[in-house]
Image (spheres, helix red, strand yellow):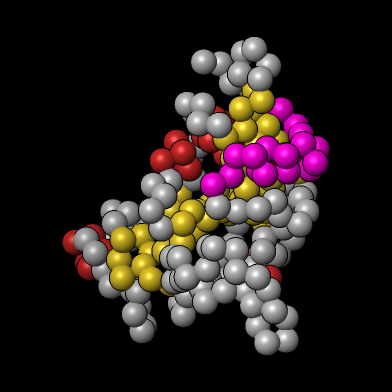
Amino acid sequence: MALTVIPLTFAQACIVVDRLHRHHRRPQGHRYSLGVVDADGILRGAAIIGRPVARALDDGWTVEVTRVATDGTPNANSALLGGCWRVAAACGFRRAITYTQSGESGASLRGAGWRNVAELRPRAGWSTPSRPRLDRGTDGLSRTMWERTRSNAVLLPVSSDLLLAAPCPHCGASAPIGRGRPAACCKAAQQGVG
């Protein structure tokens, strides 16, 4: 099935997210939104791209894919995720990030050329005594951080306190994070082969 990525308004994308997203409500805003239509022009999904939610990652050169929702049409997720990066790169951004929850494979992200950056510990939630917030049903879940980058992107300032594991730079296998340097998980990493 031929799929085409198209621009959407924030309101249009939010309608799709409200109808199709499995575990999140619509975000507060966006930089841009995209849709994917089939050969008959039927809207099959939407992606909303905004500023990074984590303040430490909001460097002016990074965007975050905050929502992707589809009706299950094959390859619609990958088409949207690929489109998100192409638009971001065309606008001059150096990095695009997104997250998956534990239990989600990330197959669409890998299919669109994204790479696993880190496994993140579960958050207790967004609510604090000074700023109470409702539980959205996604607190307490570990997440995987994914990215697409340009060659001039700087390293992410991710705190090791948040990490569960990170991919080995040589073989890609998950290496547990503890205090100090991450454990080497393959012979090349152990020998320092670069």
Q: Residue furthest left?
A: 187
Secondary structure that dominates the magenta span:
helix
Who is closer to the viewer here, 19 or 46?
A: 19
Reply yes or no: does residue 168 show up in magenta.
Answer: no
Residue 49 drawn above or below residue 153: above
Q: Position of residue 179 (x, y in %)?
A: 36, 84
Front position in the image: 189 or 73: 73
The residue at the point 66 percent across, 43 percent down is 17
Give the image quarter of residue 175.
bottom left
User: Where in the figure is residue 23, as x and y percent of width and height?
Assistant: 55, 52
Point out the image quarter for the C terminus: bottom left
Residue drawn 64% across the image and 12% down it: 40
Magenta stretch: give its range.
6-22
Residue at 54 percent across and 63 percent down: it is 137
The total of numbered circles placed on residues is 0
Of residues 171 and 159, the one nearer the viewer is: 159
Position of residue 31 measured from the top left corner of the image (x, y, whole percent): 77, 49
**Furthest-top residue in this view:** 40
Q: Is residue 174 visible?
A: yes
Residue in the image at 26% along x and 68% along y: 184
Q: Is 78 situated above or below 159?
A: above
Residue 12 drawn in magenta:
yes
Q: Quadrant of residue 32?
A: top right
Q: Is residue 61 visible?
A: no
Residue 18: x percent and y percent? 67, 44
